[in-house]
Amino acid sequence: MEIKLTKKDFWLAIFAGEASAWLSLPTLKNLKVLDILIEWGISLNSFVIFWAIFVPFGAIVGLGTFYFLAQYKNRIGFFQLGKYGVIGVLNTFLNAGVFNLLIFITDISSGITVDLFFIVTFVVTVINSFFWNKYWSFEERKTETITGEAIRFFSISAVVAIVNIGILHLIVNVIGAPASLDTKIWANVALAFTIITAFFGNFFGYKFIVFKK
């Protein structure tokens, strides 16, 4: 299969990076990062401008790196992994953004309600992920197979999500936040663990089960 880095790839990576930058702001707020920057004398406007440029640039650099690796190894899988990584960052910040927005709105960061927040973010993220991965990462355009692909996609995603709900519940509600740590930060620590398992579990499931050639 011919490996090409097209204009579409370039602009989609920029779009995904820009969206990631803005979606990350609720998470950075709950993690006190924005407050720390202000304490250091860095204005919020200056940071947002920098962030809105830096993240899309990073998406382009990351995608380009995996493209050249795919060319060097003559393996399309590396380029697919690069695209999946860009989408993964977008999904990560979409996931974390919705999760932290719900925490911010309700001021609830522990208990069963947090598990429900995770389910809401899962539904939003997995719908976004399906279309990005189908039409860009793995570029599977056979519309006649979309029903079967969707069923397999949501099945894989659901299995990974069930595992992650268990991880989130264990860390947030069973282990609990250390006395010296804000529960909002601890909830994001738990979310970080679920992101790691989701990235690898979903990639191999999507590539070899959902969008297999």
Image: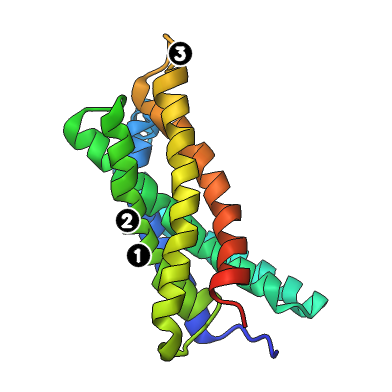
Q: Which residue is mark 2?
A: 123
- Name the quarter where the C terminus is drawn: bottom right
Marks 2 and 3, how far apart at CA: 30 Å
Q: Is residue 57 visible?
A: no
Q: Are marks 2 and 1 in contact (CB under 8 Å)?
A: yes
Tell me which label, 2 or 3, sits earlier in the chain: 2
| Mark 3 Cα-neighbour bin, 10 Å: few <14, some 14–19, many ≥20 | few
Residue sitting at x 48%, y 84%: 8
Q: Is residue 148 visible?
A: yes
Dot 1: element: helix
Which numbered mark, 2 or 3, is in the foreground of this view? 2
Q: Which mark is residue 27?
A: none
Residue sitting at x 36%, y 40%: 27
Q: Is residue 168 or residue 55 the one in the foreground?
A: 168
Residue 46 position in % (x across, y down): 35, 46
Q: Which residue is mark 3?
A: 178
Which amino acid is tagged 1? Ile
Give above or below for 94 relative to 211: above
Q: Which residue is mark 1?
A: 127
Which amino acid is tagged 2? Val
Which amino acid is tagged 3? Pro
Marks 1 and 3, how far apart at CA: 34 Å
Give above or below for 180 relative to 1: above
Residue 102 position in % (x across, y down): 24, 40
Looking at this view, name the residue that lies furthest to the top.
179
Residue sitting at x 32%, y 56%: 123
